[in-house]
Image: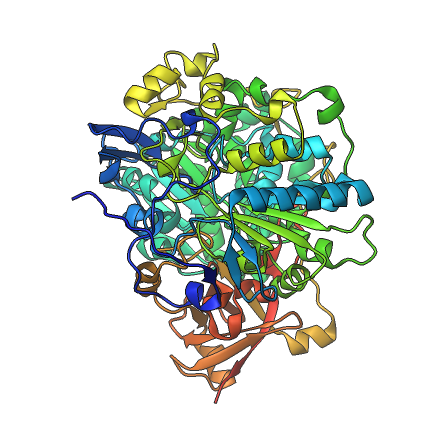
Amino acid sequence: MPKKVDTPSIQKYNRRHFVQISAQGLVGVGIGSFAVSNLSLIGCATENASKKVFGACHHDCPDTCSWEIETQSGQVVSFKGSPSNPYTAGKLCNKMDHFDSEVVFSPHRLLKPLKRVGAKGQAEFKEVSWEEAISDVAKRINTITSEKGGEAILPFSYGGNEGMVQGKAGRSFFKHIGASNLERTICGDAAVAGIEAVNGQSTGIMPEDIVHSRYIVLWGTNTLYSNQHLWPYIEKARAAGAKLVVIDPFVSATAETADVHIQPFPGTDTALALGMINIILSEGLQDQEYIDNYTSGFEELKTHVQKYTPQYVSEITGLEITAIEAFAREYATSKPALIRILIGMEHQSNGSSAFRTIGMLPALTGAWKDLGGGLMHMAYELFGQSLNYSIFDLPEEVSGKKVRSINMVELGKALTDKEMAPSVDALFVYNANPAVTIPNQNLVLAGLKREDLFTVVIEHFMTDTAMYADYVFPATTPFENWDLFTSWATPYININQPAIPPLGAAKPNTEFFRLLAREMGFTEDYLYLEDKSIVQSMLNSDHPYLEGITFDSLEKSGWARLKVPNEWRPHAAGNFNTPSKKCLLYNPDVQPALPDYIAVTQSETDKKSYPLRLLSIKSTRYFLNSSHANITTLRDLEGQPMLDIHELDAKNYGIADGDEVKVFNQRGEVFLKARIKNKVKKGVVCMPQGYWNSLMPKSSSANALTHDLLTDMGGGAAIQDTMVNVMKLA
């Protein structure tokens, strides 16, 4: 049956509406008073005939699942994964199985603009019209920019929507007004910086080719939860005789299924990889012909790794010498051997160094020569090469503006630094929930509480960040807008067609910025690009990867695989994307020229006060970062967040399984229950990220403990170097 909707009359919102679970019916679909400026935004979804449209998941995930939506008389009658895409194969993840009812038609979805009427953080709002809200926002921005300049404005967006249209919305607007530049580097950039320092690119082999591998190393990735559609290909390889090795300081669901689980201390991956190189070279297991032809800096590296003896690496990593030696030998002698890396190990001070070192291994062993051998990492560069991005080009006087950059990891500092000139006086948040996801949470919240900070949030729900907003604007979902989805880990591209008109007064992110630009009197064409036109223009490319892939073809199929070769071996004969076309084992343009393991240091006082290493990881099965953590059914399935602690540490603290504990350090405290299943080593504790502060005891979640220190390269967040203490609660 079609999903029925009605329109509740709600005049004022408060915290209770958003934190507690109401028994309201489904939210209304009345068209808002501020009309959408162009019908191409929504398509012709009100026709009486049945129709099917294609789309894809908008989340920050390596899989980017294709889906299909069927409607009748403007109502959704079917939502499912697209069975024609061979990679995602008709299966959505358990976070998205009921996206239609849990998000699109949720009774808690925001459908009208809201204006704050209470204290910041209390979520007391009243409904207002789009006209009133946009007019006030424009006036406030004009006042701030005239008094302090555009740099007093900070946009904050990230991976809550990965679309080329809605995900990149507002970029031209903020360039136009000269706003501060946001360095969106919290996740992925440290890894990419490390791999690029060696290979000049992050793209490796394609995911389907893992079926040819016979020795698979999953390093820093919980594939079963975070890369689910790769798993069937891994199982196919194992059925053909592949051995699966998982390297993870936490006993994840993936680690439990592995043939071998290697469990180093957190943050010691660089030392482990350098130790592998030591063993491979000292025992003559390298592919010297490949090294001589396609690498540079071999002698410098050979000298450098001599200190990383198995004994030394064992002391650093906590691994047995025999385990380190066996792993290095098996990896070097197994053919084809593949290392799959994602972002699990980048969130440490040695983050980029770990990726640099691991990036050298396939070149040293010649693994790149074999189908199914080498390194599997990103794929976004394929789209960067093939799509037509010229529609986003700005005039030199706009694109060339010199403005300051603010790293998103350091948002709390930026919002509270009284010496910063100009101060950040306006914050625009969309596709993000920084009150939950950004390190040093309490400093971020202190900034959001500033009465003189004008905050605008574009959202589907009353998130923890939206509670601090002056205005909250309702955003459309992918069911209601055009978009184009690339993938950062596969060669598949998806079109996203609107299936229904925007619900209530919700509007696409792009429309918000068009309306704001118009209200501010801007006339430049680049501020008014239409969503459908952006999709069409980006696909207007003659690059070989897009051969036969057009807007019209995607409208008919929904998805396509880029025309990259099947059984692709990008570095079988070198061809690295470096000036010399060689793998740079020694890179004088990067400091240091060779990767090294640098131990995290603590003062003697901190060692005594905070003796435990905290892992705060993406271990949830039913959330993605902070997305879906407000959905009651998914929270119930996920269960309460737990603190994993080793049995010897638990004994030392007098903690039993299931006890209520407080985890704390100089930045904050988090309250949860202890779990003693030896999923971590002694001296390490672990809790999941993604739970909303407002839904946790005493409104505090994992990032209340993490610091905002940056990684060695790439500007990432070194959150896994956080130290804490634990206390049993009476």
Q: Quadrant of residue 373?
A: top left
User: What number of labels is visible?
Assistant: 0
- Vertical position of residue 385 compared to residue 518: above or below: above
- Vertical position of residue 341 compared to residue 379: above or below: below
Is any part of residue 255 visible from this angle? yes
The answer to whether residue 384 is left or right of residue 421 is left
Instruction: Look at 70% across and 46% down and name the residue there.
Output: 140
Instruction: Look at 53% across and 20% down and name the residue there.
Output: 385
Q: Nearer the viewer, residue 564 or 158?
A: 158
- Vertical position of residue 111 compared to residue 369: above or below: below
The answer to whether residue 378 is left or right of residue 87 is right
Task: Measuring from the top left, give residue 378's x and y in whole percent.
Answer: 48, 34
Instruction: Look at 28% across and 29% down and name the residue there.
Output: 53
View extreme (bottom): residue: 730
Task: Measuring from the top left, give residue 46's x and y in whole percent.
Answer: 28, 31
Q: Quadrant of residue 39?
A: top left
Task: Measuring from the top left, give residue 321's x and y in whole percent.
Answer: 50, 58
The answer to whether residue 558 is left or right of residue 668 is left
Instruction: Look at 16% across and 44% down and name the residue there.
Output: 1
Is any part of residue 157 visible from this angle? no
View extreme (top): residue: 542
Q: Nearer the viewer, residue 382 or 13?
A: 13
Task: Measuring from the top left, give residue 622's x and y in whole percent.
Answer: 35, 55
